[in-house]
Image (cartoon, rainbow, N blue to C red):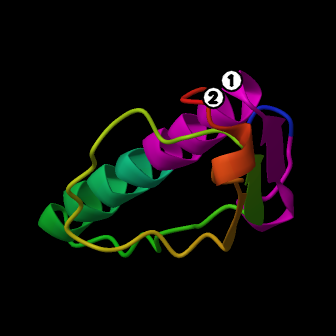
């Protein structure tokens, strides 16, 4: 992001199905990296704010990992999914 000059709060990720999973995992990876950089800057007495991305929208794209984070991600997230109705069930 720094190479392109885009501030993180102006970056919005969107994905459908597998692309939604990729977008969600990329957002999670960004957040983990930001937390790591922030904790390293605390050790060197240099303030480095944690910078969330602009937003994440995923349509039918599940998160593939089970994250445990020290601080919840501040990036706004919108998830669209559809549950299988009884009329769509293959049990009939």
Which of 35 and 27 lies nearest the eye of the viewer?
27
**Of labels 2 and 1, the one closer to you:** 1
Which of 80 and 9 lies nearest the eye of the viewer?
80
Which of 78 and 30 lies nearest the eye of the viewer?
78
**Disc number for residue 18:** 1
Which of 85 and 32 lies nearest the eye of the viewer?
85
**Disc number for residue 4:** none
Q: Tell me which residue sits at (24%, 61%) in the image.
A: 69
Q: Tell me which residue sits at (27%, 49%) in the image.
A: 67
Q: Residues within 10 Å of mark 2 (few under 14, many from 20)?
A: many
Query: In the rendered view, does 25 fall on the left or right side of 46?
Result: right
Q: Tell me which residue sits at (74%, 27%) in the image.
A: 19
Q: Which residues are magenta?
A: 5-30
Question: Would residue 29 be counted in the magenta stretch?
Answer: yes
Main SS, magenta region, reads: helix
Indicate the position of residue 64 as horizontal and vertical percent values.
Answer: 42, 32
| Image quarter in which the C terminus is found | top right
Q: Secondary structure at mark 2?
A: helix
Q: Which residue is mark 2?
A: 22
| Figure label count | 2
Q: Tell me which residue sits at (58%, 47%) in the image.
A: 27
Residue 1 visible in rendering = no
Indicate the position of residue 48 as horizontal and vertical percent values.
Answer: 42, 69
Where residue 4 sits, quadrant-wise, is top right
Do residues under tags 2 and 1 come within 8 Å of each other at their CB atoms?
yes
Q: Secondary structure at mark 1?
A: helix
| Image quarter in which the N terminus is found | top right
Indicate the position of residue 32 as horizontal and vertical percent values.
Answer: 36, 49
Using the numbered discs, state the Cα–Cα distance from disc 2 to disc 1 in whole angstroms. Answer: 6 Å
Query: In the rendered view, does 56 fall on the left or right side of 67?
Result: right
Indicate the position of residue 11 as horizontal and vertical percent values.
Answer: 82, 54
Q: Residues within 10 Å of mark 1 (few under 14, many from 20)?
A: some
């Amino acid at each position: 992001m720094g190479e392109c000059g885009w501030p993180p709060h102006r970056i919005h990720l969107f994905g459908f199905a597998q692309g939604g999973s990729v977008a969600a995992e990329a957002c999670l990876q960004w957040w983990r990296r930001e937390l790591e950089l922030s904790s390293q800057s605390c050790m060197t007495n240099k303030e480095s704010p944690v910078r969330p991305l602009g937003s994440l929208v995923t349509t039918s794209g599940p998160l593939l990992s089970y994250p445990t984070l020290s601080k919840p991600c501040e990036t706004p997230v919108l998830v669209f999914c559809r549950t299988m109705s009884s009329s769509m069930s293959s049990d009939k």
